[in-house]
Amino acid sequence: MHNELTEQDIRKMEEEIEYRKLVVRPKALEDVKEARAHGDLSENFEYHAAKKVKNQNESRIRYLERMIKTAVIVSDESAEDEIGMNNTVEVYFEEDNLTETYKLVTTVRGNSLEGLISTESPLGKALLGHKVGDRVHVEMAGGGYYVVVKSIENTVDDGTDKIRSF
């Protein structure tokens, strides 16, 4: 399976890999070496804990490298009046009479508890390409529901936010 990542996602992952290799790895190796010097390894909790931290770091590095290697690069640019990657969208849920705000992100960055929804999620897929005022049907396994796009916010080249409301 390929993960859809933006250039920004890849840069962040590369920065994390570099940090883990240059900062975390040497410290983890030093901790293992120091714990090993404390004697009997079979009953040495510090040694086992240090090895675990070292192995988790190496595992994370491999995971990030594999993600980058198999990634499909997607653009985070969209038409000015359409919903696209990295846009913050305010939507009105008709059935619940509720308004929520979400930011559309790649699968890797998705976190619904923080209002970050993946473009691969049912709501994210449904919203892509729509405009302010559109009534959008979100298809779900047990049926579906409708939302209305109330506003779209995206960052333009000069760093300012541009908001279109309904």
Image (cartoon, rainbow, N blue to C red):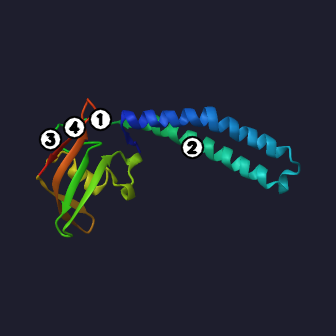
Identify the residue at horizontal 39%, vertical 54% (top origin): 111
Amino acid identity at mark 4: Ser
Residue 33: x and y, percent?
79, 40
Amino acid identity at mark 1: Ser
Is residue 148 shown left or right of residue 75? left
Is 27 above or below relative to 143?
A: above
The reply to whether the C-beta atoms of the residues labelled 3 and 2 are less than 8 Å apart is no
The reply to whether the C-beta atoms of the residues labelled 4 and 3 are less than 8 Å apart is no
Give the distance between the C-alpha atoms of the residues marked 3 and 2, in whole angstroms.
Answer: 38 Å
Mark 1 — residue?
Answer: 75
Give the distance between the C-alpha atoms of the residues marked 2 and 4, in whole angstroms.
Answer: 32 Å
Mark 3 — residue?
Answer: 81
Residue 78, labelled with which disc? 4
Mark 1: which secondary structure?
A: loop
How many neighbours does mark 4 have within 10 angstroms: few (below 14), some (14-19), or many (20 or more)?
some
Of the residues tagged 1 and 3, which is closer to the observer? 3
First of labels 1, 3 by sequence position: 1
Amino acid identity at mark 2: Arg
Residue 31: x and y, percent?
75, 42
Is residue 20 shown left or right of residue 118? right
First of labels 2, 1 by sequence position: 2
